[in-house]
Image: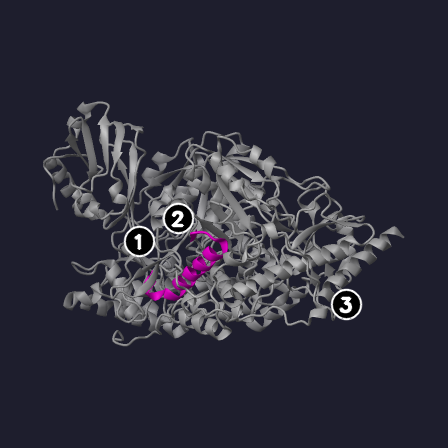
Amino acid sequence: MPYIGNTNADRIAMLGALGIQKIDELFADIPEANRFPDLNLPPARSEMEILRDIDELALRNTCGSAIPDRPILSFAGAGAYQHFIPSVVSYLAGRGEFTTAYTPYQAEASQGTLQAIFEYQSMLCDLLDMEVVNASHYDGATAVAEAAIMAVRSTRGRDKIVFSGTLHPEYIEVARTYLQPQGIGIEVVGSPESPGSPGADVAEVLAAVDQSTAALIVQNPDFLGRVHDISGLADEIHTRGALLVLHVDPIATALFKSPGSLGADIVTGEGQPLGIPLSFGGPYLGIFATRLSLVRKMPGRVVGQTTDTEGRRGFVLTLSTREQHIRREKATSNICTNQGLMALRAAIYLATMGPCGLREVAERCYRNAHYAADQLAEIPGCSVNTGTTTPHFKEFVLTTSLPADTLISRVAGKGVIPGVPLSRYFPRRTHDLLVAVTEISTRQDIDYFAETVRTAVETAGE
Amino acid sequence: MSRHDENLHAAIPALLYEISRPGRRATRISAVAAREEVPETALPQALIRSEDEQPKLPEVSELDAVRHFTLLSQTNMSIDTNFYPLGSCTMKYNPKVNEVAAAVPGFANHHPLAPEWASQGSLAVMYRLQEMLAEIGGFSGVSLEPAAGAQGEFTGNLIIRAYHQSRGDAGRRKILVPDSAHGTNPASVSMAGYEAVEIPSDSNGNIDLGALKAACGDDVAGLMVTNPNTLGLFEEHLVQVTRAVHECGGLVYGDGANLNAILGIVRPGDLGIDLMHFNLHKTFSTPHGGGGPGAGPVGARADLVEFLPGPIVVRADPAAIADANRDQSTYRFHMPAHSIGRLKAFHGNFGVLLRAYVYISMHGAAGMRSISENAVLNANYLKKLVDPVFPVRFKRTCMHEFVANGAVHDGIATMDVAKRLLDYGFHAPTVYFPLIVKEALMIEPTESENRETLDAFAHALSEIAREATENPDLLHHAPHTTPLSRLDEVQAVRKLVLRYEHRQDERT
Amino acid sequence: MTFDSNVKYQESHEWSRKDGDFIVVGISDYAQDSLGDVVYIEHPEVGSMKKKGDPFGVVESVKAASDVYMPIGGEIVEVNTALDDNPANVNEAPFGNGWLIKVKPSDPSEYDGLMSSDDYQEYAKGLED
């Protein structure tokens, strides 16, 4: 058997030491009728055989490209983005000393994990312009849900959360799963469910914030890629006694006004763009930041600086009394994960990008997406971001004369995934695609993409 | 073997911020000639982060970064470098083929919202893993959506809730939780809007059956049970326990944290467990990564499958596929009819799922049983060696782990022993858990380790016991060989420093 | 271990001392010793009304968080905010400047029902065995 430490001779000697004949005797406490079931599992495969299986399966992840030599161009986004990952990220994060360590309970034997998380916390604090960052959450969606619960805990007697309708629809679904059993009210304002609808505007969401509202949750840039001017929003929210939860794209924060300067009380984000592969949706990293004054209401693991007995700087997990292993049913959350490996990837990514590199990525995303939008908008039968002049970042809505699913099928043969059909979330938006363009696209890629869309839409007219 | 006078580790590197110098760069995005560049678009200046508001991120060269993180990694203990017998965490060897598989570009670069017909490889992996886990656990269906064990527990509580609501049974408010349970259990109960009611353990380390029966009533929604429990013992009366809960109308949720003891030995679903999560990062060898990511798929008995969180993967009905790619689609996503909903964006931690699929595929049925047989044999053998020096709380045959008393001598705390073990090159076992055993030292060797390692570990414990009588300060001041000596956790909370503080005079 | 004989106790380890018309409440030396180094105190709101037995706050060490309970019903008239910067006072002077709250009792006779120092000492000894 693979990965078993002992030989048969070892086992015999160990059984002898225990004074028994057979391993089966160790399982006498288990009801005899149910002991040793015949498991119907596929026959065991060797490493060579399983890697062949994996390679074959990977080939079935395809967009049906008719041009074998051409890599697939994907413009799918909607919360998960293809960004460039410097080679050192996987190289360093793949070190066994990082991957095969556990949660750093024994601090003296875990300084590597602890300092890396402290550096992640510090860099995210700088990027978001916030005071505290944890490193615990599974992804952006669960970070949002936990932020909502924290807001209720932090504002006595308030039990409703107002969601801007332009928050990622799956995040709203996840928030429902988390909040409903705890009796927390959910109001979604300004969902962009109709064709051409821009979704929530600032005045509209503000109007829904009342005496019972613990927090308003706003995504900026929003789910459709638009960047809103939300200066002044935090003051309005605070006047009403509620908190502002801002959900951001960490890449965008390098370019646009920081969440901290905009007055956010809690900041959440999907950390996947920071050096984490797409990997069909996970594992990702839930970014979670807040103010120092709220830190004891915060869920999740956090690393703090201290000294050892000789006065040397070191790091430990701290503020543990908020957590499940101490506070049990009264904990701020059941979360036990410390999303260490993903936070490590983000830390390495930010370190190797630096402030200039990150800004360059953000500006290229902005420029590439606008160029792509301009090219696509020129195609007869196509329009972009119908009904709004708000600037967009990395993502925009493309409306064509074809149903989005048809367009996707048509351009697939040219090696292009043109985006995510909005009908996935808003059934009436049958002709809309959410298109994401990041720094990895070249001018040629975008021109090719526009050309395939033009051909597909023109063919439709014939 | 005394290695405490050697410094086994590199020094702790400075923070990246402290070695940062303006203008140093590791990565350049674009070296393309200007004429091939995408044309500029004017930025919306009113929304832009101004020059003096730029984030003060470190500026380092690629070599700086490589050396920094390499040196940092070397200050960690890990499975790859040390025996890591952390009880309840199943620190088994993490096969490297898992990492190779997860990095295959067709998987690593695949977008979660790519069309289903273009994602058949990923869907096949998920479908097969669902089937494998259902078979191993004895369940009718599995959802791979939960991102961690704790999220699996939360899922279980939500399903219990949905089940009772579907029957119009609204009066059930309580979930029973044994006092030996992980803290996540009662925390998950609260998050699901239920009240956790603690059930004591009896003198054999089992759930106290009398107390359980007394607590069962028409206000009980269910029970959360870890089996084998956190004492490393198989619940001797599990069948009576599950029956008592079922008879009062409740459901039984299994915390699969300790599944590594019973793969191919018994199926929880066959013993009356209605729902259970699997910790893929424990039982199925996916790396713990310093605390995450993990994955906590949940299995359910037949009538609860419709409540599972979604989406799950099902075989596609060819007649129902409308588009032109019909012949390519074998699998599709499906939201169960009465699903409790989504637990995270997209569909589970696929990268973790893929690793578990590889691991199970390499074992087959006989391999599964062999894992648990060897894990249980290793634990009992080590228990036999440890018990004379560090008395084991319950003398019964244990499963994959056991709990000893670490306070080996007057004036010595379990934490002293744990810290001293680091000097011997072993990661410490879990300490002070479960809460019901004073000075608990919880040891789980796993099947990966060989007899020599177990002997060496037991020998180290004996040496430490001797040191405890001869030179207790050696323990009180341990560890001595790690890059840093014992860290002040009190100061960390009283004077909170949760981020690097930039100096006023810092170069920018 | 100190058992201040000028105060009364209850089983959850809070002490109570008469201070004019008010009752001052803290945790016992035994309690602070079991908790270890205190790092944080969560206070109730001044002006809030609580019943005997209600939790009024949390005393935290690194590894434990302990709810503290009202020994007597009444209004919280003062909380010891000096502990915010010096939580160690609870360890160093549990009966002195480590006090937690001052209460204006609704029913002063509830004070008489609390445990004497001797009884509490006996009770604490029983917990050790």
- Residue A137's x, y, as percent? 48, 52
* Residue under label 2: A292
> Are dots 3 and 2 on a single chain?
yes
Q: Is residue B181 above or below residue B283?
A: above
| Residue B251 part of the magenta-drawn span | no
Q: Is residue B12 left or right of residue A446?
A: left
- Label 2 lies in what chain? A
> Which of the two residues, A117 or B190, is positioned nearer the viewer here?
A117
Name, please, the residue furthest toward the right. A462
Q: Is residue C125 left or right of residue A16?
A: left
Q: Secondary structure at mark 2?
A: helix
Q: Main secondary structure of the magenta part?
A: helix
Q: Is residue B225 above or below residue C16?
A: below
- Label 3 lies in what chain? A
Number of other residues with Cα within 10 Å of mark 3, as a class: few under 14, some 14 to 19, many 20 or more? few
Quadrant of the rendered image containing residue C82: top left
> Which of the two residues, A382 or B219, is positioned nearer the viewer here?
A382
- Label 1 lies in what chain? B
* Residue under label 3: A67
